[in-house]
Image (cartoon, grey):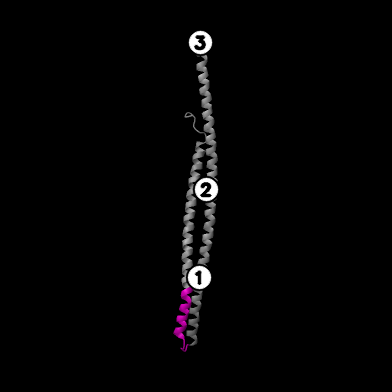
Amino acid sequence: MDAQKYPLAPMLRVRQKHEDQAKQDVLAAEERLKAAEEALALCQQELSRYRVWRPQEEDRRYAAIFGKALDVEKLRVFREQLASLAQGEVEREQKVFDAQTVVRERETKVQAARQALLLARKALLKLEKHQDIWLESMRKEEERLSDLEMEEVRGPAKNSE
């Protein structure tokens, strides 16, 4: 058995490397997913804080002008500032939506990486099973040859007696 090397050993090494690379790809995809989930959580926290702060800020600004006479220009600026506050919330909502999209994309990539790992494992296991079968057949062949040698050695010894 030592005399013969498994003929598909190079292919076995390649499949082992493919499996190792697939494992690394899964880990990397999971790390990117985790980073995207953390970014999403930060965006959601920022939106939540903004939704609490905005009405308070609007109340503060209304209180600052309440009972004061405003000319048309100051009133226009005040309305623009309120619209800017509302736009700030819309922008934060868009950031949350974008972060959710990234998370979904990364989840898809994790699933694809896991599927690739599964396929790489199956390919490796198939070849390892073939190697086991080959090794067993080599062992049996060695036993058969050994038995033949023993018969040859025994054969003349019995005839000479």
The residue indicated by pointer 3 is 160
Residue 29, numbered label? none
Q: Secondary structure at mark 1?
A: helix
Q: Residues within 10 Å of mark 3 (few under 14, many from 20)?
A: few
Q: Is residue 87 magenta?
A: no
Which residue sits at x=50%, y=83%? Answer: 76
**Mark 3: amino acid:** Ser
Residue 70 in picture, x, y percent from top left: 47, 87
Residue 54 versus residue 15 in the image, above or below: below
* Residue corresponding to mark 1: 91
Residue 52, placed above or below residue 109: below
Which residues, given as a range, are shown in magenta? 51-70
Element type at mark 3: helix
The amino acid type of the residue labelled 2 equals: Leu
- Mark 1 residue crowding within 10 angstroms, few (<14) / some (14–19) / many (20+): few
Binning the other alpha carbons within 10 Å of mark 2 as few (below 14), some (14 to 19) or many (20 upward) gives many
The residue at which mark 2 appears reads as: 117
Q: Position of residue 39 (x, y in %)?
A: 47, 63
Residues at marks 2 and 3 touching, judged by CB atoms closer than 8 Å: no
**Separation of disc 1 and disc 2 at Cα?**
39 Å
Q: Secondary structure at mark 2?
A: helix
